């Protein structure tokens, strides 16, 4: 029989998975901005050492993103809202950036990075919440060459460090270059698996020799926690997709902009 001490964490993990799945489908994100804060609060309840909490939260979040992303992108693809060309041309550089981010994950302080990322996300929110500025911007084709390498590599690096699927940055870049909000979100949903699979393996490797990991952990990935989150995230992801396609582009832009504000403020005050 399940211990009463584990019932509350399990319920919380299932709820976090549901929120991550719905947000993943709605906004094309992996759900890391929901999962990581939840795990930071819940992991100590299952015996995680304080100095390991952040790394296990990030690694476990990345593991859940693999499944949430695949579920979301399949639902978006069924509605013709995925640009496979962007995923194919960005994937190699995203994977390289993810590898670099994983290697430095346990050597860099996250406080400054979280602050910079939070401020950057708030800047992105301006793009979605100020239509006059957006409409006056000159639409350019999607970047290629060195610009693509830099953007895709940076996307992978930041996503690995923060335990996210990179959907926010992908959506912003695509809409800045003329893609519809629905197509940008659909494509961004597929970026999560490209980032999360190598990053998850990396977090397993870098945490493999860590002592006193909580039960069920493979390196910095806690499999029971990941399984609980995945169980509800894959169920709710299609509902988020359906909600996204029912909203008008104008309303979806506004909702996404407000979401970015919440994410930015959360990141700034998370440390």
Image: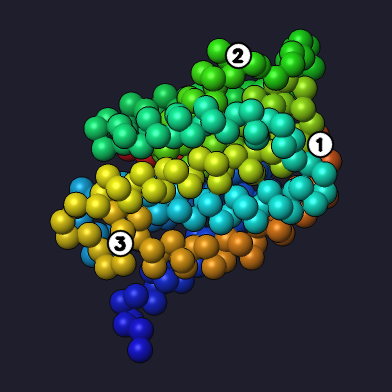
Dot 2 and dot 1 residues touching (CB under 8 Å): no
Query: The N terminus appears in which quarter of the rendering?
Result: bottom left
Q: Residue at x 15, y 56 (%)?
A: 211
| 235 versus 266 height, above or below | below
Mark in the foreground, 2 or 1: 2
Element under disc 3:
strand
Can you give x and y, in whole percent of width and height, for residue 115 in the image? 39, 28
Q: Which residue is mark 1?
A: 249
Query: The C terminus appears in which quarter of the rendering?
Result: top left
Element under disc 2:
helix
Dot 3 and dot 2 residues touching (CB under 8 Å): no
**Left or right: 61 with respect to 220?**
right
Element under disc 1:
helix
Residue reaching furthest left? Answer: 211
Can you give x and y, in whole percent of width and height, for residue 146 in the image? 55, 12
Can you give x and y, in whole percent of width and height, for residue 179 in the image? 77, 27
Residue reaching furthest bottom? Answer: 1
| 208 versus 45 height, above or below | above
Q: How many marks?
A: 3
User: Which of pointers 3 and 2 lies earlier in the amino acid sequence?
Assistant: 2
User: Which of pointers 2 and 1 lies earlier in the amino acid sequence?
Assistant: 2
Q: Quadrant of residue 151?
A: top right
Q: Which residue is mark 3?
A: 217
Residue 252 visible (yes or no): no
Q: Quadrant of residue 98?
A: top left
Q: Residue at x 47, y 68 (%)?
A: 228
Say the numbered circle drawn on residue 145.
Answer: 2
Out of 179 and 202, give the one closest to the viewer. Answer: 202
């Amino acid at each position: 029989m399940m211990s009463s001490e584990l019932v509350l964490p399990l319920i919380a993990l299932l709820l976090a998975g549901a929120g991550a799945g719905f947000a993943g489908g709605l906004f094309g994100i992996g759900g890391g901005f929901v999962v990581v804060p939840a795990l930071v609060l819940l992991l100590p309840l299952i015996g995680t050492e304080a100095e390991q909490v952040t790394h296990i939260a990030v690694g476990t979040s990345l593991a859940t993103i693999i499944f949430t992303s695949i579920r979301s992108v399949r639902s978006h693809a069924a509605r013709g809202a995925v640009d496979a060309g962007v995923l194919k041309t960005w994937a190699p550089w995203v994977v390289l950036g993810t590898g670099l981010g994983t290697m430095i994950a346990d050597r860099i302080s996250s406080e400054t990075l979280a602050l910079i990322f939070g401020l950057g996300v708030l800047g992105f929110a301006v793009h979605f919440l100020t239509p006059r500025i957006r409409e006056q911007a000159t639409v350019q084709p999607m970047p290629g060459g060195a610009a693509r390498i830099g953007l895709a590599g940076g996307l992978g690096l930041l996503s690995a460090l923060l335990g996210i699927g990179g959907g926010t940055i992908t959506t912003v870049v695509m809409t800045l270059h003329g893609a519809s909000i629905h197509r940008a979100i659909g494509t961004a949903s597929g970026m999560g698996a490209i980032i999360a699979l190598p990053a998850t393996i990396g977090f397993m490797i870098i945490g493999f020799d860590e002592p006193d990991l909580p039960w069920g952990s493979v390196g910095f990935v806690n499999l029971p926690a990941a399984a609980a989150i995945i169980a509800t995230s894959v169920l709710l992801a299609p509902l988020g997709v359906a909600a996204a396609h029912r909203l008008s582009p104008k309303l979806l832009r506004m909702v996404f902009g407000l979401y970015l504000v919440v994410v930015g403020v959360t990141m700034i005050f998370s440390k």
